[in-house]
Amino acid sequence: MSQSEQSSSPASQLPAEVQSRLDDGKQRHEAELIEWLKIPSISSDSSRRDDVHQAANWLLEKMNAAGLQTESISTNGFPLLVASTPPVPGAPVALVYGHYDVQPPEPLDLWTSPPFEPVVRDGKVFARGATDDKGQVLTHIHSVCDWLASGQRLPLQIKFLIEGEEEVGSQNLDDWLPELAEKLACDVVVVSDSSQYAPGRPAVTCGLRGIATYELFVDGPSHDLHSGSFGGAVANPAMALCQLLASMKDADGKIAIDGLYDDVAPIPDIERNAWKQLGADDEEFASSVGASELHG
C-alpha cells in the first residue's frame, strides 16, 4: 500500500534541531555508507566469513558510538545485532529489522563499476548492498543517531535487530527468536528491505508474495522405453509432471489447489484505493520487465 499524497512532508514535522543535524550530515552519511559498502559481507561464501564479521563489527561500533544500548549475540553462524534507544513511557515501540550480509556479485562482467568499490553516479550510490540492505539499515540508524545527537528526545522507543544471514535463509535468527521475544517486544516491525514505488513517492509495503519450495518425484516404467514402440501406450513421467504443474493454476492465473484461499483475507478497500492513486501503467510495467503483456 502506498500513499501518493500527503498533506505535509514528514521532514516538516521534525524538530528544527534534528532537521539541521540531518541536513548538515548528508556528506558524512554518504561517506559512512560507502565505507560500509566496501566490506564484501557475502554470507554464502565461506571465504568471506571474516568480511561478514567485519561488517557486523562496523555497524556495532557505529551504534555504540551513538549511545545506543547494544548487544552482539553469537550464533552458530553470524552474530545477531540488537540495539535500542531509551524507553518512552506510554509511547509505542518500533522494531527495525535489517541485514548486513549481501548477495554474491556475479556475474562481474555485468557491473559498470566493481561491486565493492562504491561510486556515485547521477546522485545514486552503486555497489553491492547499496539497496539490499545496507543502505536502508544505515538510513534508519543515521536518523536515530542524529536525532539523539541533536539533543532532542525521541517520541518513541526504537529497537534494532540486524542479522547477517538473511541471504542464506536466516536459520539462526529463527532459532533465537523465541529466546529474544521479550527483548524484541514491540508494537510494530519496520522492514525496509524493499524500495520506493517511484522517486519522491515513498511506499509502505504491506505484503509480498512468499515462496514454498519442494521436490516432486514422478515414478514411471522401471527402465527406458523407446517412444516409437511404447509412446502413447505408457505414460511419460515428464508429461505427467508437466500436467501436474499446469493443473495448479487455471487459465486466469488463479491457484487451483482446493482450500488454498480458505484463510486468505480479502483485500480491503483502503488498499485497493491506495493502489489506484499510484497511477500505475500496465504497458509501462510490462515493458520495464521485458514482457509483451501481463497475465492474471
Image (spheres, rainbow, N blue to C red):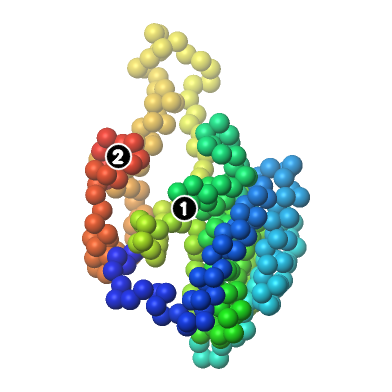
* Residue found at the very far top of the displayed protein: 228
SS at badge 2? helix
Residue that mark 2 sits on: 287
Say which label, 1 or 2, has the lower sequence index: 1
> Could you tell me the amino acid type at mark 2?
Ser
Characterize the local packing of mark 1: few (<14), some (14-19) or many (20 or more) Cα atoms within 10 angstroms. few
Judge from the rendering whether residue 211 lies leftward or rightward of residue 178; answer left or right: left
Report the residue marked by disc 1.
123
Residue located 56% across and 86% down the image: 153
- Label 2 Cα crowd, 10 Å radius (few <14 / some 14-19 / many 20+): few
155, 293: nearer the viewer: 155
Q: Looking at the picture, tell me which residue is in the foreground, 32 or 189.
A: 32
Give me the residue at 68% from left, 67% from top: 62
Q: Is label 1 in a helix, a strand or a loop?
A: loop
Q: Can see residue 66?
A: yes
Q: Please identify the quarter of the rendering in which residue 139 is found.
A: bottom right
At 42% across and 74% down in the image, what residue appears? 11
Depth check: give the residue in front, 206 or 129. Answer: 129
Residue 156 in view here: no
Label 1 and label 2: CA atoms lie apart by 25 Å
- Residue 144, position as x, y percentages in the image: 57, 74
Q: Are marks 1 and 2 in contact (CB under 8 Å)?
A: no
> Disc 1 residue type?
Gly
Q: Position of residue 208 (x, y in %)?
A: 41, 56
Q: Is residue 91 above or below residue 71?
A: below
The quadrant of the image that shows the N terminus is bottom left
